[in-house]
Amino acid sequence: MNTRILSLIAIVALIAGASHAFSAENDVATIKTEITKRHDEAVKRLQDWIGQVSIAAENRGYPQGAEYMAKLARDAGFQQATVINTDGKPGVFATLDAVAPKTVGLYFMYDVKQFDPAEWTSPPTEARIVDKPPLGKVIVGRGAVNQKGPEAAFLAALHAIRGAGKKMPVNLVMVAEGEEEIGSPHIPQLVRRPEVLDALKKCVGVFMPSATQDLDGVVTVNLGSKGVIELELVSSGEKWGRGPAKDIHSSLKAMVDSPAWHLVKALNTLVSEDGNEIAIDNYPKPLPLSAEEKSMIEKVSKVRSEPQAKKLFSVQHWINDLPWEQANERLESQPTVNIEGLVGGYTGPGGKTILPHRAVAKIDMRLVPDMKAADALAALKAHLAKRGFGDIEVNMTGGYDPTSTSADSALIKAQVATYKKSGIDPLLWPRNAGSYPGYVFTGDPLKLAAGHFGLGHGSGAHAPDEYYIIESANPKIQGYDGAVMSFVEYLYELAK
């Protein structure tokens, strides 16, 4: 009797599961039609958002950017979206309760990098749709791919689900910040608020909408990101006690020290002669690549195109003329010290014979597991002091530790499954060589899985003519509607 009852229960469960799967597939098909119907309004929403510029480094577009982000969330179906002030720029905390069994976290950024309109072929805030052979029609603007395009595509997915009269398959918790492009100095004040932590603790993981497809349609799933420190090194006559306290005539260099040369000499001690190896005393040591990570890199290097990568990055050689696989191993395993900008004295047209009293180097330092931002910063300061450059100011403007997420996490497994449903065999990749503040999710006290997801393609982040594909001419790459659909599929996969 008990055996027959158990068998009956099993059959009922199978029927219910099959019914649920059919219902989900039917939902997705209906939503796809809704996405097509709403294409123009979704693109217009992205264009309007690109026009609402928020640049933390220039204190531009605040608090309007946060208020706009909150409105976008509410319009997309979040029942509550609150602007939360920090000691820096405000963030947004939003929740969407669908009374679903699973809850998923979202990380958004609403700020963008600075830009010089003179360097663009299309105005960076007008978000024009232009032809870009052989890709198709693209939207050009600051934030187009980093990160407003993919984020707007995710919001369009929510509009389509609701517009199709379907129930959201998961609950959502969104954390959006306005300082990502200056190293997220105040994101802990946002994420570690009790109500935000309580909401995030219910999540299976946190992801950031992205455009993951290469020019040939290849998709990589990142299992983490490098950490970063952003800082300024400032050499001045006032602080040094040598050189001038104001700009003076360059003829006086014959008897007066130069703060600019002082900075150059200090910078030279940070790296090897070719600038490619870190030479900072007692600098934290990176964790060597594991056999599993090396295997990932070997596999990806056989699939991703080296000539295409060189073309995309406008380079002719890798460091030390390394072969493609070894260059990728270096990309994944090595910390870096990079000069973003070097400014001192006169930089206008023609010459101006002065001896500058001040020179500044803008530096970013990328970190890999198991390096800590605090340890790297302390080592840099001690190194400068030991080498006779203790007078040089070290002003850290933002930064954080690297992140790592297991390939076995539900968040990553759902990504892989969703891509495979789209006919894509994604490649696992140890970590993104770029950085984002995922440490607030992967570290204490949350210890959540975190990553990036989304079909579609764009490029030019931080550069002129940044773009995101709207109508793809390449069948291997999804356009805007395809990117929107990928988020719908992902949410349903996460709900399983």
Image: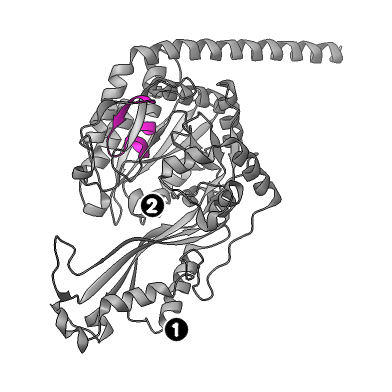
Q: Earlier in the sequence, mark 1 or mark 2?
A: 2
User: Relative to the observer, which residue lies in front, 218 or 24?
Assistant: 218
Residue range (magenta) = 133-152
Task: Give the residue pinned by disc 2.
Answer: 187
Residue 182 x, y percent position in the rendering? 33, 54
Above or below for 199 versus 22:
below
| Label 1 Cα crowd, 10 Å radius (few <14 / some 14-19 / many 20+) | few
Give the residue displayed 24% in from the left and 31% down from the top. 127
Which residue is more in the foreground, 134 or 221? 134
Mark 2, other Cα within 10 Å: few <14 / some 14–19 / many ≥20: many
Depth check, mark 1 against mark 2: the one in front is: 1
Q: Residue at x 60, y 41 (%)?
A: 301
Q: Along the horizontal axis of the image, is 65 left or right of 471?
A: left
Residue ID for mark 1: 386
**Front residue of 472 and 373:** 472
**Left or right position of 26 against 480:** right
> Label for residue 146?
none
